[in-house]
Image (cartoon, rainbow, N blue to C red):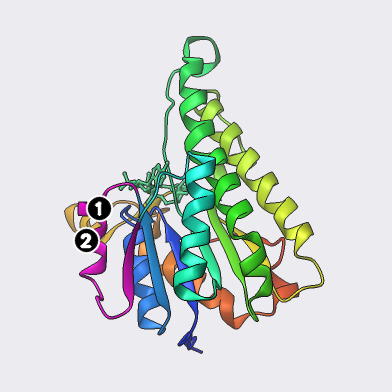
Amino acid sequence: MASDLTGSVVVVTGAAGDQGRPTAAAFAAAGATVVAAGRDADRLAEVVALDPQHIVPSVVDLSDDGATQDWARALLAEHGRIDGLMHLVGGWRGGKGIVDSDLADWDVLHASLIRTLQHATRALHDPILRSPHGRIAIISSTGLDTPRATNAAYLTAKAGAEMWLRAVADSYKESQAAATIGRIMALVTPQMQAAKPEGYKKFTPVADIADWLVALYDRPADEVNGLIETMTR
Ligand SMILES: NC(=O)c1ccc[n+]([C@@H]2O[C@H](COP(=O)([O-])OP(=O)(O)OC[C@H]3O[C@@H](n4cnc5c(N)ncnc54)[C@H](OP(=O)(O)O)[C@@H]3O)[C@@H](O)[C@H]2O)c1
């Protein structure tokens, strides 16, 4: 069943990224007002162009706690409600193993994958709790099942992000709100697939991930709160 999110306000962070764009478009198609958040106004303008009637741009650096709090207050003042946070800020560093990897990579990943999530969920926790169907979601990695030395910092950051979101889920228990984790190996865009039609067999299409996120609104809060679900093709 296709969700009807008319009247709801859903925040998509990382909206200018590979996953953010189709996600913003999918929530817009479901009728929601979509707040497309990112740091670069020009990149966000491209996202708004996907559905100008439903998508509004919102420039914020989510690595700055104070700026994120101000941003959330302004969003609530403007829209009157917030019904969801699809937190799609990404970042990847790795490839060199335990000894040769640079711990500066960890600092970058901690800032992009953990601190932005902490800031955004703290700032939007209460409005989403007040929504009749508040949802928060992140996309994590199946690499957490089989950690590789070459991916240590990235997977440590993803593990931290998952644990933070599971704690948010505890905060939402017995409410109408839910915090949910989707795991993939990697995502594939239509452009990537077109360039290599026989490739990316184990990657998850961004459209499928977007549909999965929208469908969280069709599932009961107590079914999806705290859920970690692996997406396959
Ligand atoms: N790509 C994969 O194969 C894969 C695999 C597993 C999980 N995931 C997860 O899926 C999600 C989406 O992935 P993706 O590849 O689309 O992500 P991405 O392109 O790496 O990041 C999405 C966007 O986040 C924004 N961003 C970065 N730092 C920010 C900050 N401090 N404040 C505000 N915005 C910030 C950037 O836009 P601006 O520069 O315009 O701000 C960027 O375009 C991520 O959470 C990622 O970890 C991805």
Q: Is residue 51 above or below residue 165?
A: below
**Disc 2 residue type?**
Ala
**What residue is at 55 percent from the left and 15 percent from the top?**
98
Please state which of residues 122 and 214 is positioned toward the viewer in this rendering: 122
Q: Is mark 1 within 8 Å of ligand 1?
A: no
Secondary structure beneath disc 1? helix
Q: Is 170 displayed left or right of 109 in the figure?
A: right
Please state which of residues 165 and 146 is positioned toward the viewer in this rendering: 165
| Residue holding disc 2 | 45
- Report which quarter residue 49 is drawn in: bottom left
Q: Is mark 2 within 8 Å of ligand 1?
A: no
Secondary structure beneath disc 2? helix
Please state which of residues 12 and 230 is positioned toward the viewer in this rendering: 12
| Residue holding disc 1 | 41
**What residue is at 74 percent from the left and 51 percent from the top?**
167
Q: Is residue 41 magenta?
A: yes
**Disc 1 residue type?**
Ala
Question: Dots 1 and 2: beta carbons under 8 Å?
Answer: yes
**What residue is at 51 percent from the left and 24 percent from the top?**
107
Q: Position of residue 124 (x, y in %)?
A: 59, 60
- The label number, if any, that marks residue 136 in the structure image: none
Give the quadrant of the C terminus. bottom left
Q: Is residue 143 in view?
A: yes
Q: Position of residue 50 (x, y in %)?
A: 23, 71
Magenta residues, as a range?
39-58
Q: Position of residue 27 (x, y in %)?
A: 41, 75
Q: Position of residue 144 (x, y in %)?
A: 61, 40
Q: Is residue 141 above or below residue 188?
A: above
**What residue is at 44 percent from the left and 26 percent from the top?**
94
Q: Is residue 172 magenta?
A: no
Q: Is residue 150 in view?
A: no
